[in-house]
């Protein structure tokens, strides 16, 4: 099969390596520097070059904010039978696009990334295939994912975004809060070190991935759940430490301030608040400002 991969990032490179020995693969990437690790595949830099390749399947691996734009750039050069697909972590707006694009489609979401997963041993990892879409396209991806021994889940577009907001939104947000509270120092303790390893791995991910997950329209509800549980925990600790007294002794004000967990989050609530609600273009600035004390 002739397969066109859009984007030569981490996942684009992963699919190129995975598919290039059994299929004829081309990679479309406008940045030549990102092509330096692309092997066994035709390298394309302009959408017009797609017409001559005539792919039967397109796998869109660009960041979420450019997914639809990337599709539109190559659609004029695709054959009507070509199946288009994405691996986006949030499916908002994709269903509407697919239903009007005029091409058969399939949508999946590998629930692993090159940062955390051992790409040679994926049998404990998961992937999602959206139930709507082209039958043959879904069979192709089921075969690919099964060959990797991935656990395959099937959801609708709507169900997918709800699950991702829960399964990724909560861990991402919790890890980022943990990272924001950490001083630039090491400390003993197995639990601490494990959390630090997870936090460093998460913060080494592409800024766009963090943005995609956190700006999922359903993520704020999950973050609100975290805050509710923190409020409960805070109240339990306050009552245990200070009893039912409403007034906290002056000498304990600093200790209580730490117990309240509010100080670390002041970084988020300060001058960077606008960045947190802005678009992906400012995501690097956001993460750097939030975690400049955490990242070496």
Image (cartoon, helix red, strand yellow):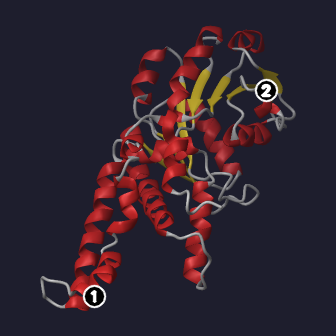
| Among the 4 quarters of the image, the one containing residue 29 | top right
Q: Is residue 139 visible?
A: yes
Q: Residue furthest front?
A: 250
Q: Nearer the viewer, residue 253 or 218?
A: 253
Tell me the quadrant of the picture where the N terminus can be found. top right
Give the Cα distance between marks 1 and 2.
61 Å
Q: Position of residue 14 (x, y in %)?
A: 73, 43
Q: Nearer the viewer, residue 159 or 275?
A: 275
* Residue in the picture at 22% in, 78% down: 235
| Among the 4 quarters of the image, the one containing residue 255 | bottom left
Q: Is residue 47 left or right of residue 256?
A: right
* Residue in the picture at 36% in, 67% down: 263
Q: Is residue 68 above or below residue 244?
A: above
Which residue has dot 1 on it?
Answer: 251
Q: Is residue 101 left or right of residue 125?
A: left
In terms of sequence position, does the residue under pointer 1 or pointer 2 come before the other? Answer: 2
Q: Is residue 8 above or below residue 248?
A: above
* Residue in the picture at 58% in, 22% down: 70
Foreground disc of the pair 1, 2: 1
Q: Is residue 132 left or right of residue 87?
A: left
Q: Secondary structure at mark 1?
A: helix
Q: Nearer the viewer, residue 236 or 296?
A: 296
| Among the 4 quarters of the image, the one containing residue 57 | top right
Packing grade of label 2 (10 A; few <14, some 14-19, many >=20) is few
Which residue has dot 2 on it?
Answer: 32
Residue 189 numbered mark, or none: none
Q: Is residue 26 visible?
A: no
* Residue in the picture at 58% in, 66% down: 198
């Amino acid at each position: 099969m002739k397969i066109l991969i859009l984007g030569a990032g981490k996942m684009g490179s992963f699919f190129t390596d995975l598919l290039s020995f059994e299929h004829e693969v081309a990679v479309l990437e406008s940045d030549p520097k990102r092509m330096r690790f692309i092997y066994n595949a035709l390298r394309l830099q302009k959408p017009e070059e797609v017409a001559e390749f005539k792919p039967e399947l397109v796998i869109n691996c660009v960041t979420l904010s450019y997914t639809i734009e990337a599709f539109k750039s190559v659609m004029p050069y695709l054959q009507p039978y070509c199946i288009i697909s994405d691996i986006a972590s949030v499916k908002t707006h994709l269903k509407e696009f697919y239903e009007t694009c005029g091409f058969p489609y399939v949508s999946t979401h590998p629930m692993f990334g090159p940062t955390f997963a051992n790409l040679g041993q994926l049998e404990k990892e998961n992937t999602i295939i959206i139930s709507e879409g082209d039958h043959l396209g879904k069979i192709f991806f089921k075969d690919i994912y099964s060959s990797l021994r991935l656990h395959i889940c099937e959801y609708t577009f709507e169900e997918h975004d709800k699950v991702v907001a829960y399964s990724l939104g909560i861990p991402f947000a919790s890890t980022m809060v943990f990272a924001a509270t950490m001083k630039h120092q090491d400390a003993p303790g197995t639990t601490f070190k494990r959390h630090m390893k997870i936090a460093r791995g998460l913060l080494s991910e592409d800024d766009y991935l963090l943005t995609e997950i956190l700006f999922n329209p359903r993520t704020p509800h999950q973050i609100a759940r975290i805050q509710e549980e923190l409020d409960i925990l805070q109240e339990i600790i306050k009552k245990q430490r200070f009893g039912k007294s409403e007034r906290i002794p002056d000498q304990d004000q600093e200790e209580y301030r730490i117990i309240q967990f509010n100080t670390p989050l002041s970084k988020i609530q300060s001058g960077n608040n606008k960045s947190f609600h802005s678009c992906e273009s400012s995501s690097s600035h956001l993460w750097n400002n939030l975690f400049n004390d955490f990242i070496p």
